[in-house]
Amino acid sequence: MAQRSGLITSDTKIRCGWCTLDTIYMDYHDHEWGRPVHDDRVLFEFLVLESFQAGLSWLTILRKRENFRKAFAGFDVKKVAKFDEKKVEALMQDEGIIRNKLKIHASINNAKQFIAIQKEFGSFDQYIWGFVHGKPLVNKPQTIRHIAPSTDISKAITKDLTKRGFKFVGGTIMYAYMQAVGMVDDHVADCWVRTQ
C-alpha cells in the first residue's frame, strides 16, 4: 500500500487521496461515496451523520455508524421525531455515539422538519434531488485539491433548509452530504471508481 500524488493505492486500486488506509474508510469510498441514494431512510441517516460530523473527522463518524444506527432507531425518521428529553438524556450517556446535546436536539428537530418536507413533496428524495434536477453532478476533479468545500448549490440547500427550521446544515456540511448521497460525484480522475 502506498500514497502517491494525493491518491491512496491499495490492492492495486487507486483511491481518492482523502481515503485513508483504514478498511472502513476504503469500503465507504468504494461502495457508497458518490453513489446516488434515493431511499428516504438513508437520506435521513446521512443527514444525521453529517450533522454529527461537524468539527470531527468523517472516519470518526463511520467508526461509530452502527452505534448511531442503534441509538437513532435504525434512522426511522418518525421514531426519531418522537424522541423526548428522557431519550436525549439516555443518548447523552451512550458512549458509542458523539455525545453532543446540541447535535442530538438538532437531529430530533431535523427529523420533524424532514417529515414536513416528505408531506409537502411526497418524499425527501423528491425535494433534495430537485436541487440537481434529479441527476448527479459529475465534476471529474484532477486531484482532491480541486474539490470545493462548498458550492452555490450546497449554499442554496442550506438556505432553504435553514428557512424550514433545520439545524447544523451549513454549506460545507451540505456539500459533504451531497457527496455522501451521490448528488455529486467528486471521485478524482485516476480513482478506480471513476475509471471503472
Image: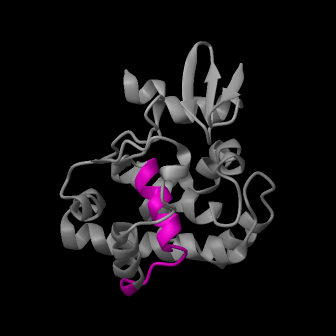
Compared across the picture, whether 62 is left or right of 114 comes to right
33 and 141: which is toward the camera:
141
* Residue 76 in view here: no
Tell me the quarter of the image containing the N terminus.
top right
Q: Quadrant of residue 122?
A: bottom left
Where in the figure is residue 130, as x and y percent of width and height?
Answer: 21, 62
126 vs 6, left or right, is: left
Image height of 161 relative to 94, above or below: below
Give the dominant element type of the magenta stretch: helix, strand or loop.
helix
The magenta-colored residue range is: 163-180
Q: Residue at x 46, y 49 (%)?
A: 180
Does the magenta segment cover residue 42?
Answer: no
- Nearer to the camera, 132 or 144: 144
Q: Is residue 117 visible?
A: yes
Q: Quadrant of the C terminus?
A: top left
Vertical side of 29 occupied by 169: above or below: below
Of all residues, the one furthest to the top in this rendering is 12
Q: Position of residue 101 (x, y in %)?
A: 71, 75
The residue lying at 49 percent from left, 54 percent from top is 46
Against 4, residue 180 (above or below) is below
Q: Nearer the viewer, residue 136 or 113?
A: 136
Magenta stretch: includes residue 166:
yes
The residue under the point 43% across, 34% down is: 189
Residue 47 placement, left or right of 131:
right
Q: Is residue 31 above or below residue 196?
A: below
Q: Which image quarter: residue 104?
A: bottom right
> Where in the figure is residue 108, as x and y percent of width and height?
53, 72
Query: Residue at 57% of width from left, 65% of height from top?
Result: 51
